[in-house]
Image (cartoon, rainbow, N blue to C red):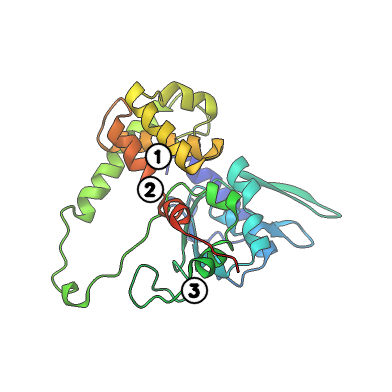
Amino acid sequence: MTENESLEITKIYSVAGLLKESKSLITARPFRAPHHNASLNSLIGGGNSATLGEISLAHNGVLFLDEITEFSKKTLDSLRQPMEDKKVTISRVKYTNSYPSNFMLIAAMNPCPCGYYGNQKCRCTDYEVLKYRQKISGPISDRIDIQKYVQPVDFMNLSNFSNNVSSKELRERVERSRKIQNKRFENYENINCNAQMSQSLIKEYCILEEESRNVMQLAYDKFKYSARSFHKYLKVARTFADMDESEKIRKKDIISALMSRDMDKDIVQMTIVKG
């Protein structure tokens, strides 16, 4: 983290009474993983004293929601405003407090009720799969930039599993792209990565070539994306370009960004028959 980010986190944990005496400054990004039984107040913040919740404790870090479909719909929908505004305001009779909540949301879920979607073992109908996924509302889904399936590894390949790109190489590419973004936004306050770009910055740094614009138009005609989704695709495409240290957003970057939403593609292909 930058020095300002470390100071912000340290202040938050000090207010929450979670700052360890042995540490005067928090330098590692926080990672919060609340259980799916967590209440709305514990996740967003609240109580009699309007205390902060998990989304503020995850500020400048990661909020991991395992089994996201098991969280109550009301609790998940309460994330909409903090994810958009990067802060949350909690009002009670005696107190009204505002806390920062600029976190990276990472979530995990089964693809269907039985967990075997796309496998011969799956017996779920399209209706059952859609009903299961509707536990995550459209506005929340719109705010999740990347939705990817993780395929199970074959048992016989577990011992000799190989990958063309190692974790070390991926880390180095990520660190290089973050340095590019830090330099890009060095003159902008509270912005240090592509995900935090405003609409004006998107227009400045995410200019599409004619070929890339045509690809986006074809995708919109098929999937009818919202304006929020369109801007998120541009941010993701900008990041793909940064990973290859490219100044311009290429056609391949747009295609890679469009391929990052597996759930959108599935919903279009599903057929619901009402009796």
* Mark 2, residue position: 260
What residue is shown at x 20% (from left), y 49% (from top)?
Answer: 169
Give me the disc on residue 113. 3
Q: Nearer the viewer, residue 266 or 153?
A: 266
Q: Given the current orientation, which residue lies at the most extreme left position? A: 160
Q: Which of 257 and 29 is in front in this view?
A: 257
- Residue 114 drawn at (x, y percent): 45, 76
Q: In this view, does 192 lie above or below 259?
A: above
Cβ–Cβ below 8 Å for labels 1 and 2?
yes
Report how far apart the C-alphas of labels 2 and 3 lie in the structure. Answer: 22 Å
Q: Is residue 224 above or below residue 75?
A: above
Residue kind at label 1, given as amino acid type: Val
Q: How crowded is mark 1: few (under 14 residues within 10 Å), some or many (20 or more)?
A: many
Which is more foreground, mark 2 or mark 3? 3
Does label 2 or label 3 sit earlier along the sequence? 3
For the N terminus, the quadrant is top left
- Residue 234 drawn at (x, y percent): 43, 34
What residue is shown at x 38% (from left), y 24% (from top)?
Answer: 208
Residue 51 found in image quarter: bottom right
Q: Given the current orientation, which residue lies at the most extreme right position? A: 93
For the C terminus, the quadrant is bottom right
Is residue 139 left or right of 172 when viewed as pictured? right
Q: Is residue 16 visible?
A: no
Q: In this view, does 137 lie above or below 189?
A: below
Q: Can residue 2 be seen in this view?
A: yes
Q: Nearer the viewer, residue 123 or 260?
A: 123
Q: How crowded is mark 3: few (under 14 residues within 10 Å), some or many (20 or more)?
A: some
Q: What element carries label 1?
A: helix
Q: What element carries label 3?
A: loop
- Residue 160 drawn at (x, y percent): 13, 70
* Mark 1, residue position: 236
Which is more foreground, mark 1 or mark 2? 2
